[in-house]
């Protein structure tokens, strides 16, 4: 988790960055949205450059995913099952 997603809104060309997190770390005012939230779940398994329509409580919003930064976790890199 803790992947950062940068979106560009197609109606006004403004960009916004979110951090996708676990539900207990969610704080929308700080840009931290849970992967299980309505918007967070729509961003899962997406790719940079992808255009999509986000369904929100305020209506549908057309966006383009400008960038996705994945956080590397040390325990994944040091997995005893990983081939070196």
Image (tube, rainbow, N blue to C red):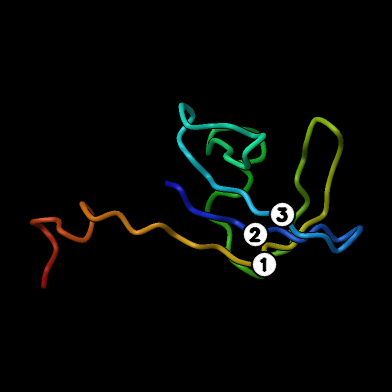
Quadrant housing the C terminus = bottom left
Residue 31 picture location, percent across and down: 63, 42
User: Which residue occupies the extreme left position in the image?
Assistant: 80
Element assignment for label 2: strand
Which residue is label 3 attached to? 16
In terms of sequence position, does the residue under pointer 3 or pointer 2 come before the other?
2
User: Which residue occupies the extreme top position in the image?
Assistant: 24
What residue appears at the point 84 percent right and 43 percent down from the top-left corner? 60
Tags 2 and 1 touching, CB below 8 Å: yes
- Label 1: few (<14), some or many (≥20) within 10 Å? some
Q: Which quarter of the picture shows residue 46?
A: bottom right
Which residue is label 1 attached to? 66
- Label 2: few (<14), some or many (≥20) within 10 Å? some
> Label 2 to label 1, Cα distance in Å?
5 Å
Residue 14 picture location, percent across and down: 82, 60
Which residue is label 2 attached to? 6
> Label 3 to label 2, Cα distance in Å?
6 Å
What residue appears at the point 65 percent right and 54 percent down from the top-left corner? 17
What residue appears at the point 55 percent right and 49 percent down from the top-left corner? 44
Q: Nearer the viewer, residue 29 or 1?
A: 29
Element assignment for label 1: strand
């Amino acid at each position: 988790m803790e992947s950062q997603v940068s979106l560009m809104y197609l109606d006004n060309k403004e960009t916004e960055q979110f951090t996708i997190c676990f539900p207990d770390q969610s704080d929308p005012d700080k840009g931290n949205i849970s992967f299980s939230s309505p918007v967070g779940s729509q961003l899962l398994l997406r790719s940079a450059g992808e255009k999509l329509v986000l369904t929100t409580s305020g209506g549908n919003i057309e966006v383009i995913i400008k960038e996705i930064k994945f956080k590397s976790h040390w325990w994944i890199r040091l997995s005893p099952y990983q081939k070196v």
